[in-house]
């Protein structure tokens, strides 16, 4: 199953090292492939360096694509993490 969703970066400093590491850690047990798209650049969300290369600032709209057998669970967890600002609220 393939899911696509837009998400807003709410963290004051954008997707810096801490939230990028949280994303990678969150995705470790998941089986689906996950990518983020911003400004016509698509990166593997399992790579901390790729996430950082997006240079996504606060209020950036990312397109999250999740493809795989556990896509629904993976997307739900990712959206919750973005909503909770990766624990930085």
Image (cartoon, grey):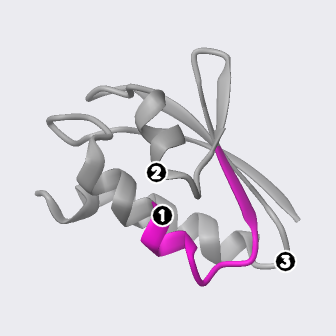
Highlighted range, magenta: 24-35
Residue under label 3: 69
Q: Earlier in the sequence, mark 1 or mark 3?
A: 1
| Quadrant into which the N terminus falls | bottom right
Q: As drawn, is 51 to the left or to the right of 17?
A: right
- Residue lying farthest right? 1
Q: CA distance from mark 2 to mark 1?
A: 6 Å
Q: CA distance from mark 1 to mark 3?
A: 18 Å
Please rate how many residues cluster around mark 2, counting C-alpha atoms within 10 Å: few if below 14, some from 14 to 19, many from 20. many
Local secondary structure at mark 2 = helix
Determine contact: label 2, label 1, CB under 8 Å. Answer: yes
Q: Is residue 75 magenta?
A: no
| Quadrant into which the C terminus falls | bottom left
The picture quadrant where one finds residue 5 is top right
Q: Position of residue 84 (x, y in %)?
A: 26, 61
Residue under label 1: 24
Q: Earlier in the sequence, mark 2 or mark 1?
A: 1
Residue under label 2: 48
Return the mark for residue 88.
none
Q: Nearer the viewer, residue 52 or 7?
A: 52
> Mark 1, mark 3: which one is toward the viewer?
1
């Amino acid at each position: 199953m393939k899911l696509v969703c837009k998400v807003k970066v709410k963290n004051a400093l954008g997707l810096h090292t801490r939230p990028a590491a949280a994303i990678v850690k969150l995705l470790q047990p998941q089986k689906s492939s996950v990518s983020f798209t911003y400004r016509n650049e698509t990166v593997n969300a399992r790579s901390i360096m790729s996430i950082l290369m997006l240079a996504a600032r606060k209020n950036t709209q990312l397109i999250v694509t999740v493809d795989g057998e556990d896509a629904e669970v993976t997307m739900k967890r990712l959206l919750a993490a973005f909503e909770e600002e990766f624990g930085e609220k």
